[in-house]
Image (cartoon, rainbow, N blue to C red):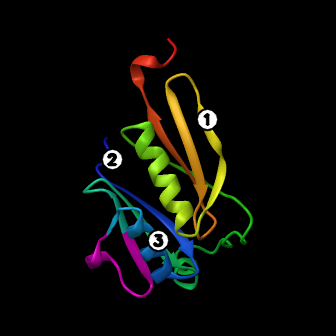
Amino acid sequence: MEINQIYINLAVKNVQETKEFWTKLGFTADEQMSNEKGVCIVMKQGQISVMFLQEDYFRTFSEKPVPEAGTIQVLLALGLNSREEVDRMVATAVKNGSSQHEEPQDYNGMYQNSFWDINGYGWNIIYVDSPKLPE
């Protein structure tokens, strides 16, 4: 079996602000899969999308409680093509209302920078230089 697409569902307080934040980072919204209850942000065309769903609508998918602001249930990681792209995305995110999560880290072949988005989700942005990874 092989997965052909990934859709991540995350609860948000304001769909429009979330859409504006992610499009400022250079991603597009799939308008066919978006409405006032949620926005589908395409991370990789045809493969990975994040559905940012209005909290009350998100709650219709599960009886479990949505974590309160300030708690963490998941950290998400996005891989980019260079250290420069990683730093550029984090800088753009911070410029548009997110906050720096930690200082950039270099793990001998894997470079990471990170931010908390406007909804409080943690995003680790990474670049993996495979030839430089330890054996």
Q: Amino acid at mark 2?
A: Ile
Percent of width and height locating residue 13: 58, 81
Percent of width and height locating residue 90: 52, 53
Q: Which residues are magenta?
A: 29-40
Question: In the rendered image, which quarter is residue 67 located in?
Answer: bottom right
Q: Residues within 10 Å of mark 1 (few under 14, many from 20)?
A: few
**Residue at figure coordinates x 71%, y 71% from the top left:** 69
- Image quarter where the N terminus lies is top left
Asked if residue 1 lies left or right of residue 134, the reply is left
Q: Amino acid at mark 3?
A: Phe
Residue wearing tag 2: 3
Residue wearing tag 3: 21
* Residue 2 lies within the magenta run: no
Q: Nearer the viewer, residue 112 or 74?
A: 112
Taking the image as drawn, is residue 27 in sight? yes
Cα–Cα span, label 3 and label 2: 28 Å
Q: Nearer the viewer, residue 76 or 24?
A: 24
Taking the image as drawn, is residue 122 in sight? no
Numbered circle sitting on residue 130: none
Q: Secondary structure at mark 1?
A: strand
Q: Amino acid at mark 1?
A: Gln
- The reply to whether the C-beta atoms of the residues labelled 3 and 1 are less than 8 Å apart is no
Residue wearing tag 1: 105
Q: Nearer the viewer, mark 3 or mark 2?
A: 3
Relative to 52, say whether 92 is above or below.
above
Relative to 19, say whether 78 is above or below.
above
Sequence-first disc among 2 and 1? 2
Relative to 96, say whether 107 is above or below.
above
**Residue at figure coordinates x 33%, y 47% from the top left:** 3
Sequence-first disc among 3 and 1? 3
Q: Secondary structure at mark 3?
A: helix
